Image (cartoon, rainbow, N blue to C red):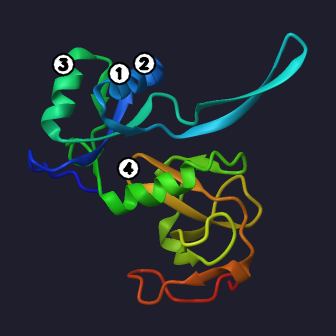
């Protein structure tokens, strides 16, 4: 996570809240302005007039990521008071997500797989995990941390936007996971070993 200010000339990913469940209104505003954004979505099935209907809904209420220059975000915020920066708990500064971290997060969260587990970052014991790369299946090429997460029987690969949200991928066979050598703080042991 990067909480430092960005330069005015470069686009950055800003973690934001669209309060009062107005993330879809924020999405429409950003689309009208031609601003790149991402709202993590999940598939929800509900019964309407006796029929099962599946639709996409926000996975985390109020959460939206905006990719723009700081000046553009300030201009849009001036028009939409419900759009607010998410502050870092430790520093109080706005959270700016590095491009590579956001790219990995979008690759997983954008799949809308109903087996994904959505977590708060503090729910994951990062120190007990190992940095890994997925070598096969729908998440092939993605990197994350292999950890035991609450609500799952086996360990899962977790990708996070630090300080905002974490997402645990569907169960992945151990033969489709390889450790990333030299990962700081995470020993390079084979997935599946204790």
Q: What is the spatial separation of the Cα atoms under label 2 and label 1, in whole angstroms?
A: 6 Å
Q: What is the spatial separation of the Cα atoms under label 3 and label 1, in whole angstroms?
A: 12 Å
What residue is at 72 percent from the left and 50 percent from the top? 115
Disc 4 is placed on an element classified as loop
Q: Position of residue 153 (x, y in %)?
A: 77, 62
Marks 4 & 2, CB-CB < 8 Å contact: no
What residue is at 42 percent from the left and 58 percent from the top? 103
Q: Position of residue 185 (x, y in %)?
A: 41, 80
- Of 61 and 187, nearer the camera is 61
Q: Which residue is mark 2?
A: 25
In front: label 1 or label 4: 1
In front: label 3 or label 1: 1
- Of 8 and 2, nearer the camera is 8
Query: The C terminus appears in which quarter of the rendering?
Result: bottom right
Q: Which mark is residue 29?
A: 1
Which of the marked residues, 1 or 4, is nearer the chain's N terminus?
A: 1
Q: Which residue is mark 3?
A: 78
Q: Is residue 155 left or right of residue 70?
A: right
* Depicted 139 relative to depicted 36: above or below: below
Q: Residues within 10 Å of mark 1 (few under 14, many from 20)?
A: some
Quadrant of the rendered image containing residue 146: bottom right
Q: Residues within 10 Å of mark 2 (few under 14, many from 20)?
A: some
Marks 2 & 1, CB-CB < 8 Å contact: yes
Quadrant of the rendered image containing residue 23: top left
Q: Is residue 138 left or right of residue 18?
A: right
What residue is at 41 percent from the left and 89 percent from the top? 182
Q: Position of residue 155 (x, y in %)?
A: 68, 68
Q: Which mark is residue 163?
A: 4
Q: What is the spatial separation of the Cα atoms under label 1 and label 4, in whole angstroms?
A: 25 Å
């Amino acid at each position: 996570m990067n909480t430092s200010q960005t330069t005015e000339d470069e686009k950055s990913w800003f973690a934001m809240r669209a309060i009062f469940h107005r993330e879809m209104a924020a999405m429409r505003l950003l689309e009208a302005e031609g601003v790149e954004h991402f709202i993590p979505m999940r598939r929800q099935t509900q019964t309407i007039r006796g029929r099962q209907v599946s639709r996409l809904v926000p996975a985390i209420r109020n959460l939206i990521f905006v990719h723009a220059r700081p000046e553009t975000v300030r201009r849009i915020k001036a028009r939409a008071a419900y759009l607010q920066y998410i502050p870092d708990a430790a520093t109080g500064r706005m959270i700016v997500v590095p491009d590579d971290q956001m790219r990995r997060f979008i690759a997983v969260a954008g799949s809308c797989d109903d087996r994904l587990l959505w977590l708060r970052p503090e729910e994951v014991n990062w120190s007990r995990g190992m940095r890994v790369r997925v070598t096969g299946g729908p998440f092939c090429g993605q990197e994350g941390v292999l950890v035991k997460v609450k609500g799952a029987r086996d360990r899962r690969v977790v990708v996070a936007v630090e300080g905002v949200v974490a997402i645990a991928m569907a169960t992945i066979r151990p033969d489709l996971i390889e450790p990333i050598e030299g990962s700081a703080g995470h020993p390079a042991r084979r997935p599946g070993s204790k």
